[in-house]
Amino acid sequence: MKIKDTFGDRAFTFFCYAVVILVAFICLYPLWLVLVYSVSDPDAVNAGKVWLWPVGVTWDAYKEVFSRDDLMKGYLNTITQTLFGTAVNMAMTIPAAYALSKTKLKGRGFFMGLIVFTMYFSGGLIPNFINLKNLRLLNTWWVFGLCGAVSSYNLIVARTFFVSGIPHELEEAAEIDGCSTAGTFFKIVLPLSKAMLGVIMLYYVVGHWNNFSTALYYTPQSTEYWPLQMVIRNMLRTLNQMIGTADEEALMYYTRIYDMIKYAVVVVAALPVLILYPFLQKYFNKGVMLGSVKG
């Protein structure tokens, strides 16, 4: 028998939907506005005529952005550095978190204390620079993977998941069946940890994709390693210089589309992550442990 909703139930449901829609609008509107600005007529944008839909659609900003060969090189560098850096991060974070989740590990509290300590105190930029210089990692590809290879926060999140999210009975059953520790980790634990692995990987991917400080501080002499963020920064600086030295006709052109180019590079830099996120979002709410323990 279906229970009829009361007026209060319907009002509360309407209120919840209204709040969700409002919050979604507040979060999505700035992203949409940047996209709209990047393809709208600069004069209409400056006159405040663009609010929701493009006005006087033009692709001049994107033509200017993609006409630069260094942008494509920066894209390739960013993709490669993101894949390489994330692989190193996951390979070092997840096994370490699993080891630290074992109560039989001697000195576990001491090691966790050291890891937590690094969340509040670090050596600083200059000691890191000197350390990488002594290791001969400056202006090399390896600095993008080994610098910041483990995030203390992500390691603690993964360790907490292994402690509270993986039933100890599963590991005991695997051990009784003759499975080694490594076999249990790869065959039992990791398949049941897809949600956590997806979240941790997303954190690392976004961090590497938006990272420009590593290239700025540790590869200043190797522009061929520059990621997309550094290329965009250099491109905007070049445009500023061109505006300052251009003739009257070029000055009018670059002054007109300068803001459009800034909006366009924001879209170019953020679009791949926005496309990737929906494919990983399912791991946030997926109940991978449902049904894993019987009886």
Image (tube, rainbow, N blue to C red):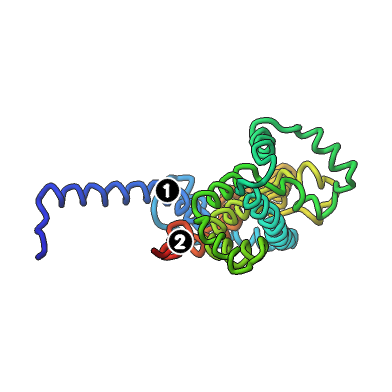
Q: Quadrant of the C terminus?
A: bottom left
Does 105 sit left or right of 266 as displayed? right
Quadrant assignment, res 5: bottom left
SS label for mark 2: loop
The three-letter code of the residue at mark 1 reads Cys
Q: Position of residue 127 (x, y in %)?
A: 81, 33
Q: Which residue appears farthest toward the top when viewing the image?
A: 121
Q: Is residue 195 above or below residue 12?
A: below
- Left or right: 159 in relation to 56: right
- For residue 77, which quarter of the picture? bottom right
Residue appearing at x 71%, y 63% in the figure: 76
* Mark sitting on residue 27: 1
Provide residue 251's location: percent of width, then percent of height. 67, 48
Q: Residue at x 9, y 52 (%)?
A: 6
Residue 86 rendering spot, x and y as whole percentages: 67, 56
- Rendered residue at 69%/57% (across/down): 91
